[in-house]
Image (tube, rainbow, N blue to C red):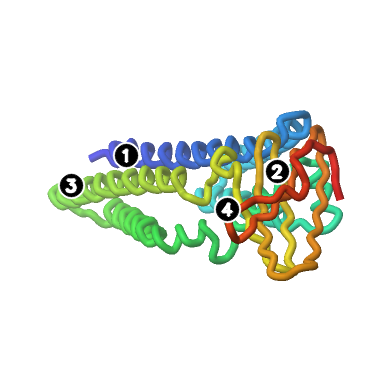
Amino acid sequence: FELKSLASGFDRVETAIQNMQKGNTEYISAMVAGYLPQDFRGTLIRQQKERTELNREKEVKALVDSGASIKEKYALLWKQQMDRRESLAQLGHATGMYKALVTYIGGVPQVLLDFIKEINAEGGPMEEQRIAYGPSIYSLTEFVSVILLFTACLVKNVSSKQEATKCCALLSEACKVFVEEDLRVLEFMGTLFRKSPFLVSTSKSSGSKYVCDAGQYIDLSIVAGDGQEVILDVHEAGTNIKWEFISTGGDVGFSVEFHEKEGHRKQLIPLSRQSKHE
């Protein structure tokens, strides 16, 4: 019995994992690109990301070529993923002058900053998915660990051909079940990720409405061709309303309306296009 005959199934699982990770990365990259300015700034951001990922791939290849173990390769891949998350978190939590540079000069909209700040946060959407669906993946990890242990015992301790045949049949069936279940879970997780409600495209975010209570303010970044509506609940006469906006690379259509209780609308500031207003 050749143990190598079982390798094809595990190769399929490895390929499926790589394809899912690559597909998810490309999906998110395309979604993020839709929010970024479609000019030299977006090109610079994309080129920087491509250089960073290429360097990470070279780092993994160099480690593997040096004869590193699977455990060492996993540790490096995990470190790289944590570095990505840390970079996103730092960008999403940007404040002060750095946030102004990112938002106004870099052209990164607030909705994208909110997305990258929350996606991996404690209690965020990715953690919710890990809590809900992680157990299925953990059980498969435990299952394959048992398979590896059984294989090691088989190679070292089987004394007769009849016993080896019986054990190998059991091993083959276990590997078949593992491969089928793993591929099923991977397909489900890939579909779940792409259809998750927290992945909102620019077309879905257009025309969003925000409610602002008294004493609060809202900081928005709006991409070209998009539109946002801010609703202010005014309870008493003499309430002061303040706003400030600036555009980089184009004009902004801006207007202010008062909605009376009877449903009538009174135009306070007619719609006009301006590059900045305070």
Q: Residues within 10 Å of mark 4 (few under 14, many from 20)?
A: few
Q: Which x, y percent locates residue 11?
A: 38, 38
Q: What distance separates the C-alpha of mark 4 from that of mark 1? A: 24 Å
Of mark 3 and mark 4, the one earlier in the sequence is 4
**Closer to us: mark 3 or mark 4?**
4
The type of residue carrying mark 4 is: Trp
Of mark 2 and mark 3, the one earlier in the sequence is 3
Residue drawn at x 51%, y 41% is 24
Q: Which mark is residue 170?
A: none
Mark 2 and 4 residues: CB-CB less than 8 Å, in contact? no
Q: Residues within 10 Å of mark 1 (few under 14, many from 20)?
A: some
Q: What distance separates the C-alpha of mark 3 from that of mark 4? A: 35 Å
Compared to residue 247, the image places residue 216 above or below, namely below
Mark 4: which secondary structure?
helix
Q: Nearer the viewer, residue 262 or 47?
A: 262
Of mark 1 and mark 3, the one earlier in the sequence is 1
Q: Which mark is residue 222?
A: 2
Q: Is residue 160 left or right of residue 186?
A: left
The residue under label 1 is: 9
Total numbered badges shown on the rendered structure: 4
Q: Is residue 9 left or right of residue 259?
A: left
The residue under label 4 is: 78
The residue under label 3 is: 169
Q: Nearer the viewer, residue 82 or 210?
A: 210
Q: Which x, y percent locates residue 274?
A: 82, 38
